[in-house]
Amino acid sequence: MRRYGCVIRLRPDHRETYLRLHAAVWPGVERTLGAARIRNYSIFLHGDLLFGYYEYVGDDHDADQRRIAADPQTQAWWRLTDPCQESLAEPGSGHWWAPMHEVWHLTEEAW
């Protein structure tokens, strides 16, 4: 299992739309994420920043990300959510959400 974190800016004028959409994420979008071996996906909001966290339990993250991007229902979802966001990713990186680097993780062994 590998953990991923990412960040993006929420456009203030689209805040209510984004929150309304995420109060009832489409089941097909959730199924696609699950089929792509994404687990424990959470999005947190702080001010105008959205922080996403998920755990990946597969063997080929890039292929599973392509599977998600190819899904028509996910594409329709993104057409609604993308205008609500402002990317913070490095231009030309191919990312919409900016990847974050894990700098610390508390494990059960520390207890």
Image: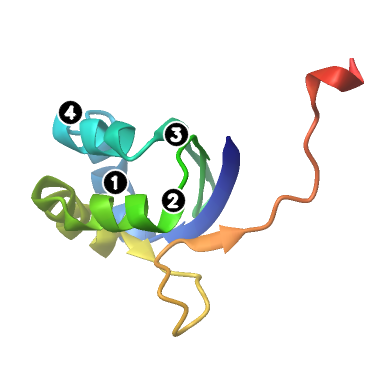
**Numbered disc in front, either 2 or 1:** 2
**Numbered disc in front, either 2 or 3:** 2
**Where residue 74 appears, x then y in whole percent?**
18, 48
Q: Disc 3 designates what residue? A: 41
The disc placed on residue 66 is none
**Where residue 21 appears, x then y in whole percent?**
23, 39
Amino acid type at circle 2 is: Asp
Give the residue displayed 27% in from the left and 61% down from the top.
Answer: 82
- Real-space Cα distance between discs 3 and 4? 14 Å
Q: Disc 4 designates what residue? A: 27
**Where residue 90 appears, x then y in whole percent?**
52, 78
- In-image side of 48 versus 23 (left or right): right
- In-image side of 80 versus 89 (left or right): left
Quarter occupied by residue 46: top right
Amino acid type at circle 3 is: Tyr
**Numbered disc in front, either 1 or 3:** 3
From where the camera sits, is residue 88 visible? yes
Check the image and report above or below for 32 versus 17: above
- Real-space Cα distance between discs 4 and 2? 24 Å
Amino acid type at circle 1 is: Tyr
Check the image and report above or below for 84 versus 96: above
Whichever of labels 1 and 3 marks the residue nearer the N terminus, that label is: 1
The disc placed on residue 60 is 2
Dot 1: few (<14), some (14–19), or many (≥20) neighbours within 10 Å? Answer: some
The disc placed on residue 18 is 1
* For the residues bearing labels 1 and 4, Cβ distance under 8 angstroms: no
Whichever of labels 4 and 2 marks the residue nearer the N terminus, that label is: 4
- Real-space Cα distance between discs 2 and 1? 30 Å
